Image (cartoon, grey):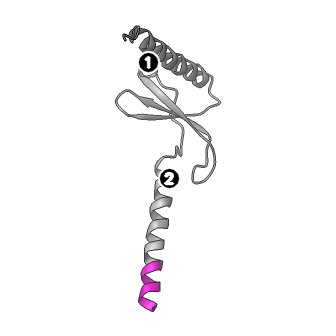
């Protein structure tokens, strides 16, 4: 019985540490400096980081074309402008995709 309880506690501890590790991996702990325009043009998506759980700072995490991440301070004036551009790019892409499908043939 003791061996089963010890095994259960070891597994539970492992799961807890694994989950805690995962929450810190996705957090921006510091902000990047304002990024040059050439890098802003490579942004393909973003996500909003809220200060909860293991993440202590609010941030906007921009993803570049090659998968690189940039952590930005949401209070910087260039950040909302870039968010709007990415949203507009997504909308344009969805609209373009629907127009290219053409009429259905039956």
Residue drawn at x 47%, y 17% is 94
Please state the extent of the stretch shown in magenta in the rendering: 1-8
Q: Dot 2: few (<14), some (14–19), or many (≥20) neighbours within 10 Å?
A: some
Whether the residues at callouts 1 and 2 have beta carbons within 8 Å, the answer is no
Q: How far apart are the alpha carbons under marks 1 and 2?
A: 28 Å
Ranked by sequence position, the earlier of labels 1 and 2 is 2
Residue drawn at x 54%, y 21% is 87
Q: Say if 67 sits above or below 43 in the image.
A: below
Q: Dot 1: few (<14), some (14–19), or many (≥20) neighbours within 10 Å?
A: few
Q: Position of residue 93 (x, y in %)?
A: 45, 16
Q: Quadrant of the N terminus?
A: bottom left
Q: Position of residue 80 (x, y in %)?
A: 61, 23
The residue that disc 1 covers is: 41
Q: Say if 84 sits above or below 58 in the image.
A: above
Residue drawn at x 43%, y 85% is 4
Q: Quadrant of the C terminus?
A: top left
Instruction: Say left or right for 85 vs 106.
Output: right
Q: Main secondary structure of the magenta part?
A: helix
Identify the element where label 2 is drawn: helix
Q: Please, which residue is most extreme toward the bottom here?
A: 1
Q: Say if 48 sits above or below 8 in the image.
A: above
78 or 98, which is in the foreground? 98
Q: Which mark is residue 24?
A: 2
Residue 7 in magenta stretch: yes
50 or 105, which is in the foreground? 105
């Amino acid at each position: 019985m003791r061996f089963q309880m010890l095994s259960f506690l070891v597994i539970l501890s492992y799961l807890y540490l694994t989950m805690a590790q995962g929450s810190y991996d996705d957090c921006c702990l510091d902000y990047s400096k304002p990024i040059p325009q050439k890098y802003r043009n490579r942004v393909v998506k973003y996500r909003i980081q809220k200060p909860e759980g293991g993440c202590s700072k609010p941030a906007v995490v921009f993803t570049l074309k090659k998968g690189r991440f940039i952590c930005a301070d949401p209070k910087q004036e260039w950040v909302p402008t870039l968010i709007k551009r990415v949203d507009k790019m997504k909308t344009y892409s969805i609209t373009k995709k629907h127009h290219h499908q053409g009429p259905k043939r039956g």
